[in-house]
Image (tube, grey):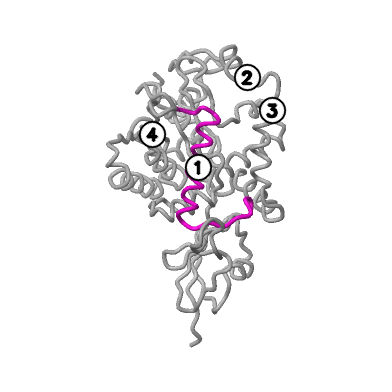
Amino acid sequence: MHCRKCPRSAVIKMPRHNTALCKDCFTEFVRTQVRRAIASHRMFTADDRILVAVSGGKDSLALWSILLQLGYRADALYVNLGIGDYSVQSRQKVQRFTDTVAAPYRVTLHIHTIEQEQGAGIRELATLVRRPTCAACGTMKRYQFNRVAVERDYDVMATGHNLDDEAARLLGNVLHWQTDYLDKQAPVLPASLDGFAKKVKPLHRLTEREIAAYALLHRIDYIVDECPMAKGSKLLAYKHALNQLEMESPGTKQNFYLQFLERRAASPDAHHTMAEQDRQHLHPCTACGQPTSAEVCSYCRMMARARAEAGAPAH
Amino acid sequence: MIPAMNVTVTHPRKELEVQGPIHVRQLLQRLDLTPEAYLVIRGDELVTEDAVLQDSDAVEIRSVISGG
């Protein structure tokens, strides 16, 4: 199979674009998609300090790599979730990437270890508070990423969410008519009030397969194994369903998610909803000061419940 | 002993032997794997669905799906 743009051999076929590309043309395609995402959603500029949330997986390491190559000032934060060998391996991948690929850019890797600061890994925490591990993990990561971004004065926090992540999440929200969550599903969440970092998803135009291919072609050493806690997750079921549809009708995932974004942007009240709603409904958590719609934020409620269940004194 | 290529599929990890020559597209069909969810790697080289795999090849079929 030949590259559709040059005489070289293709390394990847992309039915959603009805094309096949060689390594160099594919690399340019990926970087163009990221540049387009950044520009069209005004995610950040070359002057901004960016904090990339890295996990050791393909998406976050590819994102960090691409942002550095595009000339952005991007540090990273790794949250060690205390999931046995998986966390040991993922941290090694992040450290190796930092020491080899990222080091020439003179960046900083921040590491937050849940076992050190909260006294238990995410699995034990989730059991204590009787929540699905992925839900407890999400609460923990969102809280820590936001906290570090705000405390260390980063202008924006970037995550490696890709087109498959966003399309699967959209499908889940639509299937359950969780319209409140639809408002929050955007490639940019504004720093709508003090204590909230701006959050962006520069990979939202690229599929998981394209990002994995980019990582492989650029020798990014990422953790290939799936998180053991994700087994049986609903998100994986939605991704599987969408991939079946994608095989029948290439372009389904991008049409579903990107047209959702376009339609919402075109609606008359699109521009004031998120930031204004945040300002109307959010206030500082009485325990930690981070923004919340309740008296105490979900992270502090989770940690208080964990302390109570473990018999430890509350503080 | 009949020669065959070594094929490794990632999570859930399994190893199998497949007789070549065989197209990547046919291999994925035979294993009932969705092309959109996998990369096929011969040695350390990414290959497209029309590539022909031989008995002497070491092949990895890598899942690209993650998330929880």
Of the residues shown, which amino acid type is indicated by label 1?
Answer: Thr
How far across and down, in percent of the image, does residue A220 sit?
Answer: 39, 51
- Residue beneath the point at 68% across and 36% down: A259
Q: Earlier in the sequence, mark 4 or mark 3?
A: 4
Density class for disc 1 (Cα within 10 Å; few <14, some 14-19, many ≥20) is few
Label 1, label 3: how far apart the Cα atoms are: 32 Å
Q: Which of marks 2 and 4 is nearer the N terminus?
A: 4
Of the residues shown, which amino acid type is indicated by label 2?
Answer: His
Please determine whether, in this image, residue B32 is positioned above or below residue A192. Answer: below
Element at badge 1?
helix
Q: Which of marks 1 and 3 is nearer the N terminus?
A: 1
Label 4, label 3: how far apart the Cα atoms are: 34 Å
Of the residues shown, which amino acid type is indicated by label 4?
Answer: Tyr
Residue under circle 4? Answer: A72
Please report the bounds of the magenta region as a residue range.
A15-44
Chain for numbered disc 4: A
Residue under circle 3? Answer: A179
Q: Which of marks 4 and 1 is nearer the N terminus?
A: 1
How far across and down, in percent of the image, does residue A152 sit?
Answer: 35, 23
Label 4, label 1: how far apart the Cα atoms are: 15 Å
How far across and down, in percent of the image, does residue A127 sit?
Answer: 50, 37
Question: Magenta span has A212?
Answer: no
Residue under circle 2? Answer: A271
